Structure formats: C-alpha cells, structure tokens
Amino acid sequence: MARKALITGVTGQDGAYLAQLLLSKGYEVAGIVRRSSHSQVSDHRLKWLGVAKDVKMVDGNLIDLSSLIRIVREERPDEIYNLGAQSFVQSSWQQPLLTANVTAVGVNNLLEAMRLEAGNARFYQASSSEMYGLVQHPIQSETTPFYPRSPYAVAKLYGHWITVNYRESFGLHASSGILFNHESPLRGLEFVTRKVTQGVANIALGRAKELRLGNIQAKRDWGHARDYVRAMWLMLQQDKAEDYVIATGRTTTVEDMCKIAFRHVGLNINEHLVIDPALFRPAEVDLLLGDPSKAKRAFGWVPETSLEEMIVEMVEADLAALRSVQG
Ligand code: NDP
C-alpha cells in the first residue's frame, strides 16, 4: 500500500518541491491549504512543478487545532511535514503575534493532533538557522546555542523545542531540521535571493534601472530547496528521530550573491544597486554558516546544486517568466 504524507505549507516553496519528491517515490500526498476569500487555491508552485493535480488539498489552518485533528484523523498519514509558517522575518516585526500563533503555537497544535490521532506517524518540523541569530559560534551545528533576533526566530525556537519535547515526553518520532537558507525559482518575491534574481531580470529586459537592497554585507549559507527537501524525507526514514542541521557549509555575502546574478546577464552591479537603509532589519543577523556533517554521517546527505548554479537557474526562470508576460 502507498505510504501517505501530509504536508502543511504545501503551497509554499518547500511544500511544492517536497510534494514532487514524495509523489515520485509513490506516496499519496495531502496538503493543508488555508481558505482565502478569492476561493482559488494558490497552487501555482505545484503547477510549475507539474504536480498540482496529484496533491489532495484539504482545508485547514495551523492555528485551528480542531481542523488539524479532523485532517489527521481522516487522512491517517504515515509522515507529517510541518512546513507551514508565517515565514518572512521582516514581516514578523509587523505581525509578531500572528507569527507566534502560526509559527510557534501552530507546531504544538499539529503535534497534539498527531499525538491524539496518529501517534505512530513520523513528524518533521521546519526549524530555521535564524534561531542562531546573534551567532554564538562561527560555524553553527546541532549543539550551538541559539540566540534568536526576530519575532520569527523566537517563534521558530518554540517550534523547535516543542518538537524535541514531544519526542522526549511522548516517544513520538519527531525530528527537527535546522535548515539554512534555501532558494529556487519558486522562492517568494519578498526574499532577498528572488528579489535579486527578478530585479536583475527586470533590469536586463530594460524594465527597471535599479535594484534596492538593505544590508548587503549580511552573510548567508544558501542552498537549493530541491536538495533540502530530500534531507527532510531522509530524516523521517531514520529509525531514530533526531535533529539535524542542513546547510552547504559555505557562506557568501548578499553582495557577492548579487554579483553572480548581474554577471550572468552581463551587467555591472555598481550601475544598478542602491542601498536603502529603510530595508535594514531592526536587529540584524550578520553571519550564518552551517555544519551539515551530522546529516552526512547519518544518511549521506550532501547538497548537489552550487550557489552559482542556483542563482543562474533563478535568473533564467525570472527572465522566461517576464518575457512570457511581455508576450
Ligand atoms: P513559504 O513562505 O514559501 O511557505 C509558507 C507556507 O505556509 C505557505 O504554504 C503558506 O500558505 C503556509 N501558511 C502560512 N500560514 C499558515 C497557516 N496559518 N496555516 C497553514 N498554513 C499556513 O516558506 P518556505 O517553503 O520557504 O519554507 C517552508 C518552511 O521552512 C517554513 O516553515 C519556513 O519558515 C521554514 N524555513 C525556510 C527556510 C528557507 O530558506 N526557505 C529556511 C529555514 C526554515 P499560503 O500559500 O496560503 O500563504
């Protein structure tokens, strides 16, 4: 019988890539979608990957425990992937309580639904490198202390520890993946890599002149979402639930990431990049650099796509999308 997976955040970047991966492995995939007034499911990412019709969409919300209990009872999943979140750091200062409800308490809601209705299922929690914040060690691993620097990161820290706690308290197979930044052509437009690749594509097509960014000296460890969802699945295939850092082990400034995009279209970054202080974070995370060696040792995970390959893929996808709109 086909294994069943339930994904929250299935309409997001990671949810779409994970659904594609699980379907290719023969899973039945159900995804939780929240209702919106326009009554259209935002499944454009799933469509882009050609899997929208193969995912069963179920109506629910991470802040509504009753909906989660109903869904877990009806779907009886073998694996539950909690990718849903208010996931944008900058918005978390504008909507800190919503962020806490969805990104922190929402995890607890889903764990409760699983404990009550599907105690033998396996659980994945989407933790974040943002939890390291004001980094306590130049290279961050599973044992590095956390120091969150945004309402988002504080909420993720709750989600992380409640996952650990449900594993230790109730014996659930619950793992937390501490994932460093990962991107793709499906990344939301508000995130810096996509802002850069779409901005550069717009400039290359003569539709814009400048790209406005905040702190370009911030350093991040960027990988490709396709590689990172593979790590999520691998975590749940282990006999013992544990927490793992997933990262490339290479850090790059926002400025150098931009240079890759500008270089690809033959433009000079200095003629187009504008620094806008309004885009700086109230509390910055200066450096993120992950050590993924535990995941490599445990299940052989290594990233397959380099930063250069990924940025080029993203610029090309943005160029193609903009050209198609242009007609
Ligand atoms: P996205 O922002 O692309 O997707 C977020 C998803 O959460 C969307 O499907 C969204 O639905 C859903 N969602 C938001 N609020 C709710 C709610 N109240 N109930 C149910 N679903 C909700 O994020 P990513 O795919 O990039 O990331 C996946 C997860 O991994 C997130 O939890 C993120 O915080 C975490 N993470 C991501 C990293 C990255 O670099 N991408 C790094 C580390 C962690 P809708 O379509 O309706 O908006």
Image (cartoon, helix red, strand yellow):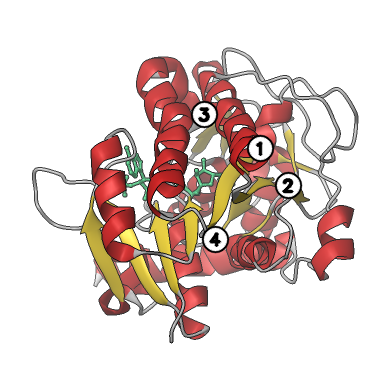
Q: Amino acid at mark 2?
A: Asp
Between circles 3 and 2, the one closer to the viewer is 2
Q: Secondary structure at mark 4?
A: loop
**Residue shown at 89%/55% (left/top)?**
293
Discs 2/1, front = 1
Task: Say which of 295 and 168 sits in front.
Answer: 168
Q: Residues within 10 Å of mark 4 (few under 14, many from 20)?
A: many
Q: Residues within 10 Å of mark 3 (few under 14, many from 20)?
A: some
Dot 2: element: loop
Q: Marks 1 and 2: in contact by CB < 8 Å? A: yes
In the image, what residue occupies the spot 56% across and 31% down? 156
Of circles 1 and 4, which is in front? 1
User: Which residue carries the number 1 mark?
Assistant: 164
For the residue marked with disc 4, what is the amino acid? Answer: Ser
Q: Tell us which disc is closer to us: 3 or 1.
A: 1
Residue 305, picture quadrant: bottom right
In primary-sequence order, the first of circles 3 and 2 is: 3
Q: From mark 3 to mark 1, how far is it between C-alphas?
A: 23 Å
State the separation of the CA atoms marked 4 and 2: 24 Å
Residue 46 - label: none
Q: CA distance from mark 2 to mark 1?
A: 8 Å
Residue type at numbered disc 3? Val
Q: Are marks 3 and 2 in contact (CB under 8 Å)?
A: no
Residue under circle 3?
89
Quick one: label 2 or label 1, which is nearer the N terminus?
1
Q: Which residue is mark 2?
A: 243
